[in-house]
Structures are given as structure tokens and as C-alpha cells.
Image (cartoon, rainbow, N blue to C red):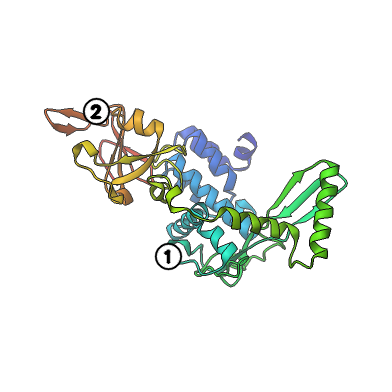
Amino acid sequence: MAPRCHLLPEVACALDAGTIGFEAARLVSRVADRDTIRAWLDRASRRTTKHLEEEVEAAESIARASGLAHAATTPPDQDTLDAYVALERAMLDGTAANLLVHGGPLSGDASPRLGDGAGQMSGGAGQMSGDGGQMSGGAGQMSGGAGQMSGGGGQMSGGALGSDAGGVKLRPGAGRVALRLRLRADLVAFWRDVARLFRDAGEPGELADFLVRTFWHTWLGRDGSARVAYQDVYERERFRCASPVCSNRDLTPHHLVFRSRGGGDARDNLIGLCVTCHLELVHGGRLRAEPPAPDVRWTLGRAALLTVAGRERRGTDARSVTPGGACHSGDRVR
């Protein structure tokens, strides 16, 4: 933090003034530069740490895919963030992997917009190198292009990352991430022999690509009976606790209107909460979540829910929070 605050004194000033906390300062300093610092500090002042971290991750991913330095990014707008979330959800629920393996168009929320241009996501060929006992495989890449997601022949419609990233020429291999595995020399020799046999057999493509596809073909077969209860709710939440101040992923289903009060299993009445938020905070009276699920109103505080003579009233230290914003005292806001 010290070197970053030296380069970006605005971060140090905001931290000293109490406008942002240490964690927010750390996140902002990861992505901001002299041109974008004001925009990021403004965003940080209106976000919980959890949501700020998600926006920083989105900005970093877009910068990496575009081949730009992280510091060249500005805070993502809502459309860009929604598209990033939709893409993450498609990756988590298997939609993107099915596309890469079997081909075919992505539709609905799985066909996200990620900005003003168009983009593609394609599988890397992968390569093996010896000497140090190292095997590397190219992972997928996201870059500017015609809005395609290739690998299984499928297409991803909708805009994505601008091919020129706002007039900036992308570096070669933008978005490509290399996966490197350290192996013993005998294992490297073994896999080289396998790769040679693969080529001699006349199979198309590279061995690394073949292995990845074989893995997905094996594991993507969906058995409807094997799905856990409320899995669609967990996938909707991207396997993250829905609380605006928690990033845990050990989800359990929570009925916004308690079943003891007549709440049912309608998806508008269900969210995913981690064990701590669910059992210790919500049912312990320190956190309250009001329906509907797409637009939950949260009340935070030690006495978030008090029941007196059958009526609910606010605790004196309760605080309310917007799903993508900061906490507020004294009134409840969405």
C-alpha cells in the first residue's frame, strides 16, 4: 500500500479522511492510475467492500482480455458488470463448457454483452517443453473480434471487448493465459511420447486440446437426478453468499419469508446464504433480508429484527444496505 499511496496520494488522503477503509484502498490501488483514480474513489465510497472487489475483478479480467494494463481501466458500468456476471454464471453452471465441447449458440443470460465491441473466446493449442521438467498448455483467450466463442464451433452473440479497446492497439496474445505444470523429467518424456503417438495416429489438433475436450466430454454429462436441491438457486447466486458483506461460498438455501410464516419454495423467495450468515446472523436476529430475491432489501445490525407483541420493529443500531452500495444508518434503502 505504501508505494501505491506514494504514486496515488489521493488514496492516502481518502484513507486518512475515513472516506474509504483500508480494504477499499487496497482494491482501488490495484486498478487505478492518475487518470482513473477519482472515478475509482467515487465508486469505492458508494460500494460495500464485497461489491467493490467484484467490480475490481471484472475490470482486471476485461483489461487482461484486452491486453491493457490494469491501471488503464475505469470502473465498469452496470451493463458491463451484468454481462460479466452472466458470463461467470455461464462458466459455473456448465453452459460455457458445453458450448466449447459441443458447439451451438449461447442464448439468454449466457450470451452476455461485455462492452461496446465484440469478442471471442477460443481454446489455446497448448505445448510441452522439457529441460526443466515443465509442461505448459495454453488456456482459453478472450480478445476483440467478431463476437464468437470458438472451440466447439459455437458462437457467442452480443458485443464483448472492443477489438481496439477504445483505439488502443492490443498486444499480441491478449487475453491468453498460460498454465504451467512442473513435472519430473521422466513424466515429461512420457507425455512427449504420448504426443508423438497422437500425431502419428493422424488425430487433428494438439494433444493438450484433445485431453481438455475428452475431460469435458466425460464430465459434462448431466444426470438430472444427481443435481442437489436448490442447485439452480446456488447457480443464480454464482455460488457466492448473497449477503452484501460476505464472500463465503458454503451456501445453504434461505427462505426470505420464513417457511414458518408461510413462505414457499418460489424462486423469488429463495436466496443462497453461507452457513454463518444463515444460521448465526439471519436466524440470530443480526441480519435481515426482505423479498423479493431479485431485489433484496438488507438490514444489518445487532438488533436487525426484534419482535414485540407480534410486530416487527427496527433495532436501534440496525443499518440498511443497497445490494451494490454502501451501508446507511437510520433509514432503509434498496
Left or right, 178 with reference to 143: right
Q: Nearer the viewer, mark 2 or mark 1?
A: 1
Quadrant placement of the N terminus: top right
Q: Is residue 239 above or below residue 208?
A: above
Residue at the spot of label 1: 108
- Eyeballing the image, is 329 above or below 142? above
Of the residues shown, which amino acid type is indicated by label 1? Gly
**Residue 66 visible within the image:** yes
Q: Which mark is residue 316?
A: 2
**Relative to 261, is 284 above or below?**
above
- Categorize mark 1 by other alpha carbons within 10 Å: few (<14), some (14-19), many (20+): few
**Does the residue at mark 2 contact the one at mark 1 (Cβ under 8 Å)?**
no
Residue 68 visible in the shown view: no
Tell me where residue 213 appears, x and y as whole percent.
64, 59
Q: Residue at x 57, y 65 (%)?
A: 102
User: Residue 120 or 205: which is nearer the viewer?
Assistant: 205
Q: Nearer the viewer, residue 203 or 77?
A: 203
Residue farthest along the left direction in this orientation: 309
**Horizontal side of residue 316 vs 69, given as left or right:** left
Q: Earlier in the sequence, mark 2 or mark 1?
A: 1
Q: Secondary structure at mark 2?
A: loop
Which residue is at 79% across, 42% downward? Answer: 183
Q: Is residue 322 left or right of residue 206?
A: left
Corner quadrant of residue 196? bottom right
Q: Amino acid at mark 2?
A: Thr
Q: Residue at x 47, y 39 (%)?
A: 249
Between 201 and 63, which is closer to the camera in this rendering? 201
